[in-house]
Amino acid sequence: MSKNNRKKFALDWITIGLYTAFVIFGWINIYGASYDFDQTNILNFDHRAGKQFIWILTAYGIGGILLLIDSKFYDIFAYYIYGFIVALLILTIFIAPNIKGSHSWLVLGPISFQPAELAKSATALALAKYMGQYGYKVRSLKDLIIPGCILFLPLLCIIMQKETGSALVFFSFFLMFYREGMSGIILLLAVAAVTFFVITIKYSVTTLAIGSGSLGIIICCAILLLVILFYLYFKEHKKKETGFLALGILIVYSISVIACHWIDVNLQWVSIGIVIVSCLYLSYIALIDRKTKLVFVILFCFGSIAYCFSCNYIFEDILEPHQTTRIKVLLGIEKNLAGEGYNVNQSKIAIGSGGALGKGFLNGTQTKLKYVPEQDTDFIFCTVGEEWGFVGSAGVLLFYLYFILRLIKMAERQREAFSRIYGYCVASVFFFHLAINVGMVIGLVPIIGIPLPFFSYGGSSLWGFTILLFIFLRLDAERLEKVRQV
């Protein structure tokens, strides 16, 4: 069998088939979302569906070229590719025009391109190159310093371009770090940070039925106390001490609530005081039994309290006004259906109106009458929901789930760390885009403006996802070729 035939045989054709299905169905929905009653030709190159068709053809061309390149090229030139893209990102900051408040698009005549889309592939290659070297393992946080710098540099450049959505995608690489040995505690800390931030902001202005203080801080302190009791009971097996501490917490809270009927009791400071006393009790147990792990629980509690007090400062003084407004709309603090909440509200109406089976192709009223802004880019999923209904939407999500699980399976079967790490980077990026985009459209996460892979209109995103995927397909094909050579 010739070398070219072996390459064809080694390619994962199921993944290529899924890619083709996504691209074609995405193109159909772009046509549906941008449909103009005066122009019904899907191949009219003056309209978005026609332009997307050109992007699709060029994407297939790029994919084909990437499959022909020897897989060793990606390993050897990973740092060079990364350096070139970072330099391009820095250049973009200074020469890109202001488009909707962002300086992230390079305009070359009639073509606009976003270098940030290429940064995902370049960063994944650089991470795979460094972490895939012989003898490298993630044993402690110091082993993540250089990978963290590799990740942070393009992220910082994209933030300076004022493209927050694209920058947040880079946090998805932490899923790959976890696979390569990073402690799950870091992921738990990230989840805790998001949870405490949401609770603190959402309930900071809620009026208490009795007493005074911030309900958000009180809830966060209650969570910390549950963490202390859980760890003491299930991890340290201190049943007697856990019961004593729980009883003390219950008594203090009960007395404070009863006292609110006669005097104004600040339940926020009462809660903080209980957490501090509980931590002192843990310190006593740690000293007596020499349980050093309890120190981390104590540090987590004190750090969490300090973090909760900083949330309002982060929310009001660090985030941009439009970002704070979007978060307020998401959390139900503000309605603002005519402003920041308009997109999500119209998107929900469009998806809900689709019902079980949808209104049918090109029959969606919300999308045809252009009620949903960006309905062929960031909000393309609402077109799927309105025209194809719950069944069509669920089908798309199930195919995406199978696609991501297949990428993980492909990553696990790699014989070289470089290919495995790159594969997990690819799976992480696709998962993040899918989760955030769909969550954004149905109102579960703030609007941050990231595309749905292979569905949203745009050549930059389609090229970026194609490059990301087809490099991995080439690396995976090389795996089978090496088996035959042996």
Image (cartoon, helix red, strand yellow):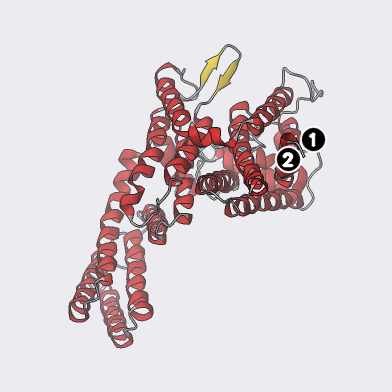
Counting from the top left corner in percent of width and height, residue 104 is at 47, 25
- Work out whether residue 408 or residue 198 is closer to the camera in this orientation and state it: 408
Residue 6 badge? 2
Locate residue 384 relative to residue 141 in the image: left or right.
right
Residue 349 occupies which quadrant of the picture?
top right
Residue at 27% x, 59% y: name it.
305
Foreground label between 2 and 1? 2
Residue 393 lies, with reference to residue 447, above or below; the image says below
User: Which residue type does callout 1 highlight?
Assistant: Leu
- Work out whether residue 477 or residue 445 is closer to the camera in this orientation and state it: 477
Which residue, given by chain and number where applicable, does mark 1 sit on? 362
Residue at 56% x, 46% y: name it.
423
Q: Earlier in the sequence, mark 2 or mark 1?
A: 2
Residue reaching furthest bottom?
Answer: 240
Counting from the top left corner in percent of width and height, residue 142 is at 30, 51
Residue reaching furthest front?
Answer: 486
Residue at 70% x, 50% y: name it.
399
Residue 24 lies, with reference to residue 10, above or below; the image says above
Which quarter of the figure is the N terminus placed in?
top right
- Work out whether residue 162 or residue 73 is closer to the camera in this orientation and state it: 73
